Amino acid sequence: MNGLLFITHNTERYCYLQSIEIALQGGCRRIQLRMKDAAPEEIERTGRQALTLCAQYGAELYIDDCVEVCKNLGATGVHLGKTDMSPVVARRMLGKNFIIGGTANTFDDIARLHAEGVDYIGLGPFRFTHTKKNLSPVLGLTGYRDILAQCRQTGIHLPIVAIGGITIADIPDLMRTGIAGIAMSSAILSADEPVAHAQRIIATIRSSEIGQALP
């Protein structure tokens, strides 16, 4: 696995499915379908097309927030934000064959999610980003170092993915904190050659990997 999680983002240049295809062509094999404020029916329709695309590349599809849509589609898993359904409830709905991720901003968030049985953590934001509303306090590199150290000290070994305003230049230092991977969206889609940029990002992650593998 290459350690890149691509999160869909609708832009003036690309729709959700076009953004997914760009990431897949660039070598990404983990896609999170994030369609904030869209109706579940619309997410499910787009999700079915996204699943077809992912199948062509042997990629995994995760659904943001919508547990029922994830179950209906038979996606790889679901990612739950801090105000979404409890991972405990999601696990009862989905069973053991789906991966459940959760959003964290602090070590206390991670400890709670660990106790609730998530499979991985999306930790952020690294820096300010326009792609997320109600942004939590920015962590910066020091925040990641401190939180990852606390995880090691307390025996929490969940894979942690960094997210939020990350650029390719940030990747080596972030990977050295012990994270499992990087989540990106705008950094890829805003590039002049997004497919080539995704390829460079993946190569940079691979050359820097020392963290816990993703599930």
Image (spheres, helix red, strand yellow):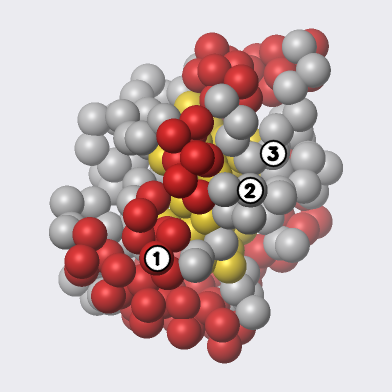
Q: Is residue 91 above or below residue 30?
A: above
- Dot 2 or dot 1: first in sequence order is 1
Label 2 – label 1 distance at C-alpha? 15 Å
Which percent across, then down, holds residue 128? Answer: 35, 34
Could you tell which of marks 1 and 3 lies nearer the N-terminus? 1
Q: Quadrant of the N terminus?
A: bottom right
Q: Nearer the viewer, mark 3 or mark 2?
A: 2
Residue indicated by mark 1? 72
Q: Is residue 22 above or below residue 190?
A: below
Numbered label attached to residue 39: none
Q: Which residue is mark 3?
A: 159
Name the side, left or right, on which 130 lies relative to 74: left
Which residue lies under the disc numbered 2?
A: 96
Instruction: Name the kind of residue labelled 3 in the image.
Output: Pro
Question: Which amino acid does the dot numbered 1 rest on?
Answer: Asn
Residue at position x 83%, y 42% from top? 210
Q: Are marks 2 and 1 in contact (CB under 8 Å)?
A: no
Crowd band around label 2 with a 10 angstrom C-alpha radius: few (<14), some (14–19), many (20+): few
- Badge 3 marks a residue whose secondary structure is loop
**Residue at 50 percent of width and 50 percent of height:** 94
Q: Amino acid at mark 2?
A: Lys
In-image side of 192 versus 134 (left or right): right
